Image (spheres, rainbow, N blue to C red):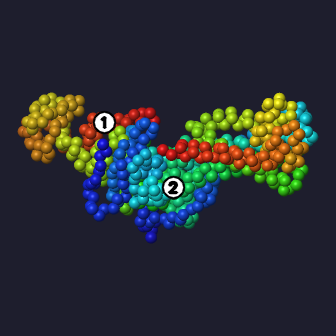
Amino acid sequence: MSVRVDTVAGMRADTRLAIEAIDLVKRFGSEVAVDGVSFAVPEGTVLGLLGPNGAGKTTTVRMMTTLTKPTSGTARVAGYDVRKQPDMVRRNMGLTGQVATVDELLTGRENIRMIGGLYGIRRRELARLTDRLLQQFSIADASDRPVKSYSGGMRRRLDLAVSLLAGPPVLFLDEPTTGLDPRSRNELWDVLRELVADGTTLLLTTQYLEEADQLADNIVVMDKGRIIAAGTPLQLKQQAGHASLVVTVSRADDLAVAAALLRKTGADVFVDSGARQLTAAADGLADMTRVAGWLRDSEIEVDDIGLSRPSLDDVFLSLTGRRADNGVNAEEGSA
Amino acid sequence: MTFVEQRLPTQSIRPAIHATNIVQQSWIMVKRNMIHTKRMPEMLTDVTTQPIMFVLLFAFVFGASITNTGGPSYREFLLPGIQAQTIVFAAFVVASGITYDIEKGIIDRFRSLPIARSSVLIGRSVASLIHSSIGVVVMAVTGLAIGWRIRGSVAEAALAFALVLVFGFGIIWFGILAGSLMRSVEAVDGVMFTVLFPVTFLANTFAPTEPMPHWLRVIAEWNPVSSLAQAMRELWGNGPPAPASAQLPLHHPVLATVAWSVVLTMVFAPVALRAYARRTAD
């Protein structure tokens, strides 16, 4: 029942793969957490692994990063098999998990030094690297304070800095921005873009459709341990259906007349009287200009008129019949 | 050059990575634990104020009424007993440490690195032994202050201290097992206290075993802790050899201590390693 992703958009025959998941299966007792997952990530691209809580994203990442043994199937990271050459995989990848895996009693600097020492980076180079990372991730001021006193965002940044110590060609990020405020999130995205520009291959799991849309070249959507869709963000959006035309009228009195005009395009019209907003499926720009003309002729004033491409939220809804952000809300509520 | 300096350490400017060996890796883990102690000096209370309190309480509260020690003053009899108790509690220290690491998720970070997975355990174990050794030194000094003396040769005295460490190595496996099985540091505290406290008392640590009912005396004298305490007493000249009525291990306490350490390791190391592997995998 697994969906095999044999072709990845934009992938040429000579493209080298940085990550390959090959029919990964993970069972915990009788529960199947990951059920035959296969995908490929070409070098230097970003794959967004999208899905609600419990979809199997984290387990998939843990198998690809040698933290969890697959029940069956395997994965290749930077060309090395996670089952046969786990140490080579560890040498060539960085991992930032959902929980910041830094030592709370150590300072930021001590944390980086400790991991750098374990990687076998020589003292002098490590000292230089540590200063640079502390600067880059804006933790220089707090570098000699125990991590205990850091904010959530600072811990995340330190965790990412630690993951980047050895300059890994492949980076795994498990829900990197969960719990971050919008500003920290944007800053993190910028860092990730910089890494990708430099050739790093990124795999990030997320529950935020916007995040996948912002960063990913390709998206794999998981639900209940299986891949239910894959493609570029654009492809997935097209799969979700047509664009819709959204009109916001200035006066609520005009809603009925405006709705009648929109119906002339042949589409069903959804009326939100509170927001004075009308939504109808549309073919594209042609529909929009026609409707705009009719509204002008009828002297109906509008606050806004525009085409809305389906968001990844809509994609998820059309694939699973439920919204993806339910899980996020539930998680934030319990945190 | 300055431009490059500003860049992230991505692959275009990867730092040189040199293979490290398990000794170097374990040492980094030990240093990590040392920093923990430095940040939270109160972690040392179990090897400083607590044993001193024990020495003083026992010496002055029970000291007057326990006279059948077979010769030496109670204070001389007591000191090796408390040393034995302190090293048993090393298992406590390592258990809390391992549970703490698992709870905080940092084990995942270590497991994602190209290092020997056992280095985390070795580091924790060595750090726990160092931790408990502080207690051994603190207590020796306290003992000297209240009248305990080493009456044997330097070599015998050193052998006694070495035995403490050997025994600590054996008992630590029990701590690793407990730490891998428990779900929280609080649970470790509860369980280890309930298990280890009786083990250190049901022995010749604080009082001679001879007056005990026969069945209890047999248990106490076969208790590995008794062998260690007896070995220290004999090597430091703090007490006579065990009476003829004593159980076998106490007649050869040095050999018995080494043997018990080997047995503890053989019994607990395989299960402890399996429990640890199972707990940290998946």
Helix, strand or loop status at disc 1: loop
Helix, strand or loop status at disc 2: loop
Residue A246 on image: x %, y %: 19, 39
| Left or right placement of residue B90 versus residue A237 in this view | right
Q: Residues within 10 Å of mark 1 (few under 14, many from 20)?
A: some
Residue A179 on image: x %, y %: 43, 42
Real-space CA distance between mark 1 and mark 2, rounded to the nearest whole angstrom: 37 Å
| Left or right placement of residue A73 versus residue B126 in this view | left
The N terminus of chain A: image quadrant: top left
Q: Is residue B108 visible?
A: yes
Read off the residue under disc 2.
B113
Disc 1 to disc 2: CB gap under 8 Å: no
Residue farthest along the right direction in this orientation: B71
Provide the chain ID for the residue under circle 1: A
Residue farthest along the bottom direction in this orientation: B1
Taking depth in this image into account, of A155 and B130 the one nearest to the observer is B130
In the image, which is nearer the foreground, mark 1 or mark 2? 2
Q: Amino acid at mark 1?
A: Arg
The C terminus of chain A: image quadrant: top left
Read off the residue under disc 1.
A323
| Left or right placement of residue A68 versus residue A204 in this view | right
Q: Is residue B37 visible?
A: no
Q: Residues within 10 Å of mark 2 (few under 14, many from 20)?
A: many
Provide the chain ID for the residue under circle 2: B
User: Residue at horizontal 80%, vertical 34%?
Assistant: B218
Taking depth in this image into account, of A18 and A316 the one nearest to the observer is A18
Residue B57 on image: x %, y %: 82, 35
| Left or right placement of residue B200 versus residue A156 in this view | right
User: Residue at horizontal 53%, vertical 52%?
Assistant: B110
User: Residue at horizontal 22%, vertical 44%?
Assistant: A239
Q: Amino acid at mark 2?
A: Leu
